[in-house]
Amino acid sequence: MTSAERRAGMSLAAIFALRMLGLFLILPVFAVHAAGIPGGDNLTLVGLAIGAYGLTQACLQIAYGAASDRFGRKPVIVFGLVLFVLGSVVAALADSIHMIIAGRVLQGAGAISAAVTALAADLTRDQHRTKVMAMIGSSIGLVFALSMVAAPLLYAAIGMDGIFWLTAVLAFGAIGVLLWVVPEAPPVPRANGGRFIDVLRDGQLMRLNFGVFALHLIQTTMWVMVPAALVSSGGLPVPEHWKVYLPAVLLSFVVMVPAVIIAERRNLMKPVFNAAVGLLALVQFGLWLIGDGLIPLALLLTLFFVAFNVLEATQPSWISRIAPAHAKGTALGVYNTLQSVGLFLGGLLGGWLGQRFGAGAVSLFCGVLALAWLVLSTSMNPPPLRVVPAPTRD
């Protein structure tokens, strides 16, 4: 990669990391915290609070992606980060589960994922795009691991309102990185109409969209139930959950990095991708059948992070290669909309299924969904890799 591509990858990964750290910090502690606030005894509302930001993201990702095609990537990203800050402030000031849900909804209105990934595609060549998406995916995984370690300590030190204030500060930091570190993007090619319908008519794009929906629904659903499982069946109090999360995430990177390199260099995207989807299904059925006890939970969480990180790296790269050049923002907007719908429904369904039928029903449902995705993914074929020479000057 050129120095400009490396700079783009690292700086855009930092923007994702700063934003996602604030979102992830609530996952290990919120379900426990909610029991002590008005309305927090309703597990469905707790799940809604965890996944609520996905609702407004689902409504706005396409609009943000299309706006970035029209007005440029950076102005749209700044606008979204400002809304995210406002939502964090509302949640920090909340005194009930309902106000926290309102703040999470406003956080989700900063739906910048499509614009950021479109900017990453603008600033990188095809043969290096998976590496850049892997940087972004890895940054998300690393801040997830950091949040698992830091959240219980932060919660003890500054409380849930302090975590939301910290989230606002991190989003301000992301704005600074965008304005002063991320390289300027080339002009976006223009076209007359047809963008949205072209995306919807593309079978491969829509199968990838279903995949990201399933992946993030499963992820959010798991985190409605996993912290409680580690406490009840694993015998591990919340402040010590990092002892499971951190090794699981770090070990997953040992597998994810070579898997992504093999997929890209040896043109093995499809088998690596399908193997990750199959592993995701295996983990869910494993949680259903043997998900009691600390060791089984730790092993299954490690395998989950392997599958999740591989899919997080390969899917955006694949979709940016398929999408028409003039509609990358729109295509990634549809993609991120389905991702956000998955995040929202994962929290809501996880809470509802867990309350009505127990944790086993949650894992069984996620396993069936992952199997359906595997069936769809077997009919997909990645486009041939287009190798573009580096420019003579960075």
Image (tube, rainbow, N blue to C red):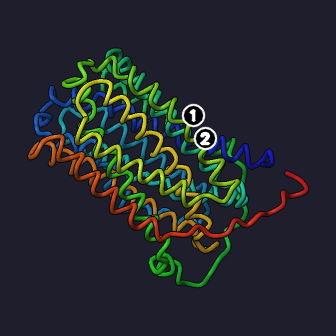
Question: Which class describes the residues within 10 Å of circle 1: few (<14), some (14-19), or many (20+)?
Answer: few
The reply, left or right, for residue 130 in relation to residue 357 is right
Look at the picture and state if 35 lies above or below 52: above
Secondary structure of the residue carrying tag 1 is helix
Cβ atoms under marks 2 and 1 closer than 8 Å: yes
Q: Residue at left 61%, top 54%?
A: 74
- On residue 257, which mark appears? 2
Q: Position of residue 52 (x, y in %)?
A: 28, 49
- On residue 254, which mark appears? 1
Q: Residue at left 38%, top 31%?
A: 299
Q: Is 339 or 312 nearer to us in this picture?
A: 312
Q: Amino acid at mark 1?
A: Val
Look at the picture and state if 148 lies above or below 306: above
- Residue at the far left in the pictured view: 356
Label 2 – label 1 distance at C-alpha: 6 Å
Q: Is residue 83 visible?
A: yes
Q: Position of residue 276 (x, y in %)?
A: 47, 50
The quarter holding residue 227 reads top left
